Image (tube, rainbow, N blue to C red):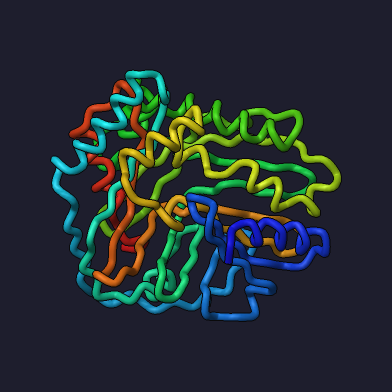
Amino acid sequence: MRAEEVRIRMNDAGRRRTPFLFAVDFEMTEGIFLDDPAAQHELLFRVPAGSNIPKTKVPAERGTFEASPEPYEVYLSRFDVVMQGLQRGDSFLANLTLRTPLALSVPLQEVILHSDAPYCLYVPGRFACFSPERFVRIADGRISTNPMKGTIDASIPDAAQAILADPKETAEHYTVVDLLRNDLGMVAERVEVKRFRYIDTLRTNRGDTLQVSSEIVGTLPEDSFSRMGDILFRMLPAGSVSGAPKRSTLELIRRAEERPRGFYTGVFGYFDGRELDSAVMIRYIEQTDGGMCFRSGGGITVMSRPEEEYDEVLKKIYLPFL
C-alpha cells in the first residue's frame, strides 16, 4: 500500500490501542500494514515487544553463503560523488550503501528463523531483515531512539578503545546523535542524551563485531497514541542511514546511488496495544529476479578514506548466527 495510508492506519490503530505491524520504505512511497500480526505466520517479525517467530529452533544447516561485491572502482565512483558534496558543504555526514549479489542456499525464511537479532522481518518474495538497530520506542509517555554509528572487528586488539578513540568515527557519531536529538525535538519535549557511545557486541557467522550506539529520550504529549503515525513519519527517513542536514544529504545520496533503496534502510515496527518498538532496516537481504542481494552501507565524512569505507561495508555482509 502507499506509505501515506500506513501513516493514517497507524494513527487509527493507535487511537484504538489495537496491535499492528508496519513497515515503510526509505523513499516513503511504499508501506506494509497488518492488523493483529501475531495471528498470522506469513510475514515473520520480532521486536523486543513481541514476535510471531517460533521460539524453538533447530541448528541451521550448512549452506552456501558467498558474496560477489561490486568492484572497488564502482564504489569509488559513488564515494567521489558523496565526497564532492561534502566538500561543497551540501552535507556533513552521508550514508553510502552497496548492493552485493549473494549465493545463498538457505531460504530467506530460514535466515530469520535462526537469527538472534533483536529486530527481524521476513516478507515472502521480497526480503529478510535482521537488524541490530532500534529506530524509536514509544511507551509510558516517552519516546527513545538508539542510533548506531561506528563498527569494528572485535578481534582487533583493544577494539573497543580503538573505535571510541577514532577521530572520524567520533565525529560521525556526534553528528548523528545531534541529528536524532533534533528529530526527537520535533515531536517531543525535554529531549536528552541518556547514554552516549556505549558498545554492543554482534555475533555473526564471520566473527564478532562491536557496534557503537547512543540512547536519546524525550517526553511525548498525552495524545501520542492517536498520533503515532504522524510522530514516526515526522522523523523519517531515519537519520542514521541518511545523514545531516537531512534534506540536502538525501539529494546527494540519490545522485550517488542512482537507484531507489526500497525497503532497505526504511523502518518497521510492532505495536502491542501498549508500546511501539521499531527498527531501522539494516542487515538486509533482498530477493530479486536476478537472485539474492545483500545491502550494506556506512557513513561518509570529509575524513573518510574510500578503501576503509569499502572494507567496512563488506564486513557488514554476514548471517546473524554462527
Viewed as shown, does residue 322 lie left or right of 55? left
Location of residue 20 by image quarter = bottom right
Viewed as shown, does residue 195 lie left or right of 166? right
Looking at the picture, how far across and down is residue 175, in whole percent?
A: 48, 25
Looking at the picture, how far across and down is residue 71, in whole percent?
A: 14, 47
- Up the image or down, 176 lies above or below 275; here it is above
Quadrant of the image containing the C terminus: bottom left
Viewed as shown, does residue 147 lie left or right of 216? left
Depth check: give the residue in front, 49 or 101.
101
Q: Residue at x 52, y 43 (%)?
A: 238
Depth check: give the residue in front, 111 or 30.
30
Q: Number of numbered discs present?
A: 0
Tell me if I can see residue 265 in this picture. yes
- Up the image or down, 254 lies above or below 60; here it is above
Q: Residue at x 28, y 67 (%)?
A: 292
- Up the image or down, 216 lies above or below 4; here it is above
Tell me if I can see residue 151 in this picture. no
Depth check: give the residue in front, 300 or 78.
78
Q: Which residue is drawn at 68% across and 31% down?
A: 185
Quadrant of the image containing the N terminus: bottom right
Looking at the picture, how far across and down is residue 129, in whole percent?
A: 43, 61
Viewed as shown, does residue 46 lie left or right of 62? right
Depth check: give the residue in front, 297 or 145.
297
Q: Which residue lies furthest to the right in this view?
A: 222
- Up the image or down, 72 lies above or below 206; here it is above
Looking at the picture, how far across and down is residue 87, in whole percent?
A: 32, 19
Q: Which residue is drawn at 55% across and 26% down?
A: 178
